[in-house]
Amino acid sequence: MNKENLIVSSRFVESWEKTPRERLVPEIISLFKETHRQADNYHLLSINGKIVDPETRQEVNIDRTSYIGKSEGKHFDKLEKWADENSQGNAVWISPMCDGIYPCNKIIFYQIAYSFGSMEKSLLNHVILFDSPKNHCLKIANKIDPQFESLENPEELRNKLIVVDDEFNIASLLAAMLSQENTFPTPSLATISYFVDLIHQGQNSKFIATEMQKRGIVGEHSISCKRSPSTYSNYMDTRALVLNFSTVEGQSDKYGSLQFTCNSCGRINTRPLNTLLTNCQHCNADVRC
């Protein structure tokens, strides 16, 4: 049982008490997918120059009270303007790790698209986390666009929006690198509705988080953002596919080597730092000791 996940999930539950029901359902699904390391693509809408939550039709706002929030707010303003002024396109945001807030680095790939039927302009989002050193963000940025070669501080990337051409397809390339097949079924709507009701009834957050863990909504994998989310401002913190870009051969953590061979298929598995795997990333065989 991941005790840290229980604590962080409890904080989320506390912040969700007044979250609209239609927004809370995808938030719970997102928590499930992240703690089970399942990819979770999501979308927002671009309407009249504003980025809007498709579930509640409310504008997405960024908490700008902190240094990090102000930097992310500048990025978000650029994203909002870019989405409004273009009919198509792709862009990238690189968010370096930050002690006490973001335990690892993060990339979000954006693509302008249109909702089927209504033809509303949508902003497709694909989030990838990676646990290499913070300076690795600079190398990735420079590889995407050489103009960032002169940057020395990874924090300078936090307020940037990197617009790329139509041929840029690193999102699918990086996603393909994570070959782990996860067979955990998404919780039923009845199960999710049960927890939505508990949250809106004001039940104890630790009790709800414990029940979520018992019923399989909260998994064993760590949650990428440790701070409590605030409604409509947490889109850049969640819904993540986790990859490990660090050179792990020969490296180890408190559990031992980060790499091991599956006894069933003979292929090498690579663990995220300080996290155990339950199934082989290639054949899904049980690899627990």
Image (tube, rainbow, N blue to C red):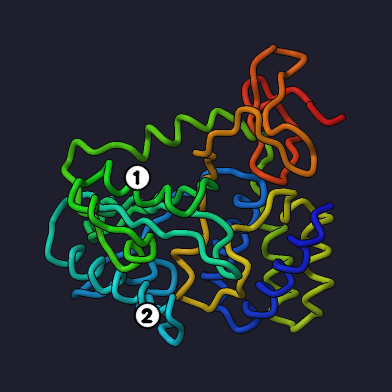
Q: Residue 74 in the image: state x and y as whole percent.
A: 29, 75
Name the one closer to the observer, 203 or 167: 167
- Looking at the rendered structure, the number of numbered marks drawn on it comes to 2
Q: Residue 140 in the image: state x and y as whole percent.
A: 34, 45
Q: The residue under label 2 is which amino acid type?
A: Lys
Q: Residue tagged by mark 2? A: 70
Real-space Cα separation, disc 1 to disc 2, in angstroms: 23 Å
Label whose residue precedes the other's in the sequence (1 or 2) = 2
Can residue 113 be seen?
no
Residue 246's mark? none
Q: Residue 93 in the image: state x and y as whole percent.
A: 33, 57
Label 2 environment density (alpha carbons within 10 Å; few <14, some 14–19, many ≥20): some
The residue under the point 54% across, 45% down is 242
Q: Residue tagged by mark 1? A: 140
Question: Which image quarter: residue 200?
Answer: bottom right
Can residue 135 be seen?
yes
Q: The residue under label 1 is which amino acid type?
A: Ile
